[in-house]
Amino acid sequence: MYADTLSSSELRYRRLFEAAHDGILIVDPETRKIIDVNPFLVKFLGYSRDEFVGKELFEIGLLKDEAASREAFRTLRATGYIRYENLPLLTKSGVCLAVECVSNVYAEGDRTVIQCNIRDITERKAIECALRDAKEQLAQHAAHLEAVVSVRTAELRLSNTQLETFVYSIAHDLRAPLRTMQGFAQLLVQEHSAALNQQGRDYANFINSSAQTMDNLLADLLDFSHISQRKIDLVPVPLETAVDGALSSLQQEIQTSNARIEKIPPWPDVLAHAATLQQVLVNLLGNALKFVSGKAPEVRLCSEVRPGGIVRLWVEDNGIGVPEEFQERIFQVFQRLHTTEYAGTGIGLAIVEKGMQRMHGRAGVVSLPGRGSRFWIELAKAADAKTVPSPRRPKP
């Protein structure tokens, strides 16, 4: 290539050498001296060609010192290739650049030379550094947010616990004066009825009825507070045992309403808290017995094992049904659709929801007005205890 006469292939190489947009150095492997440099590198670093030729790589700042230069050339002779990812390189004006240097040994006619390709990666390294800093800042910000969320979650739990304790205390303490009010109203009617006219007796009966309604409301609030605060240990519970226990608790209501109850197996074991599960079932069955119009209640209980080791229990009735727009709302506290036709406090389904959340389960309803309701609850199958459903309540 450096002879007076160049072959056609050498001419092509020379054109590429001079037109390249990366720096190129040609080095003699024996002397370690630069014997040629392309125009791009001359312009890039600001040195003249003569300032490059005859120097070793460390003398232009590409390697640390002469020892590093000797080590690099030993590696090149052994492997024919060496690559430096991030070398500092000063321009003649003193600007420090980051460069990538790839060196190869190759034969050129009857001689061997080393070609060093030098690429400016200063901008790339700056971007990588900025990205690294941004990731570190993001990680620090995420850690800070996580700590803040953790603290606020703990504060919220404490606040909820205090609120539930307050509700329990108030509900418990209010029942005593209500019972006193109710008792005196009953005595007034029973022992002083002759001294009262019909309007007075009606007033006394109204006081008694209102006190009983308030007492029922406070009792439900106590149940809601209790189910929120009680210690929950999830263990395998036979589903049929929980169903039978709930039906036994409601035996009087079943007989009074002439209800027909149908149980359809199978009844797998579920991962639950027995007392909480029975309370949930009592509330669902109580609604099925209550919300009917002009006919005897018909209640059907069945279960199915769904994908993911989830057991869904259905409580189906022939009642008045629930409009679709209210099917989410009825699981909230004090949400009643029928305030006068049917007795109740609006807390029963909230207890169902809270109980299922405490057992890592879910509850929902499928219903059409006038065509009955199909309430459902889901729990993990005991044999698949590691599979715990989300506490959310999506539409089935």
Image (cartoon, helix red, strand yellow):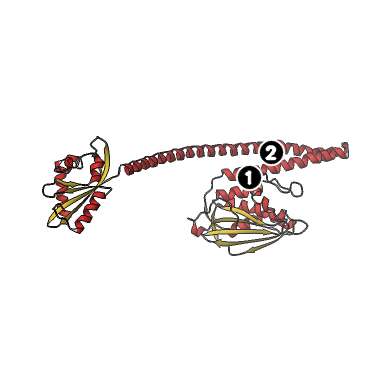
Image location (x, y in percent) of residue 217: 69, 43
Q: Splitting the image into 4 quarters, where does residue 257 fall? A: bottom right
Residue at 56% across, 59% down:
311
Image location (x, y in percent) of residue 116: 21, 49
Residue ranking furthest to the front: 5
Q: Is residue 40 above or below residue 365?
A: above
Residue at 73% across, 48% down:
338
For this rendering, which residue is in front, 211 or 103?
103
Callout 1 crowding tier (Cα within 10 Å): few <14, some 14–19, many ≥20: some
* In the displayed structure image, the side of residue 35 where residue 15 appears, left or right: right
Which of the marked residues, 1 or 2, is nearer the chain's N terminus? 2
* Residue 24 appears in the figure: yes
Local SS, label 1: helix
Question: Which numbered mark, 1 or 2, is in the foreground of this view?
Answer: 1
Residue at 66% across, 46% down:
347
Image location (x, y in percent) of residue 281: 63, 54
For this rendering, which residue is in front, 140 or 271?
140
* Label 1 sits on residue: 223
* Label 2 sits on residue: 175
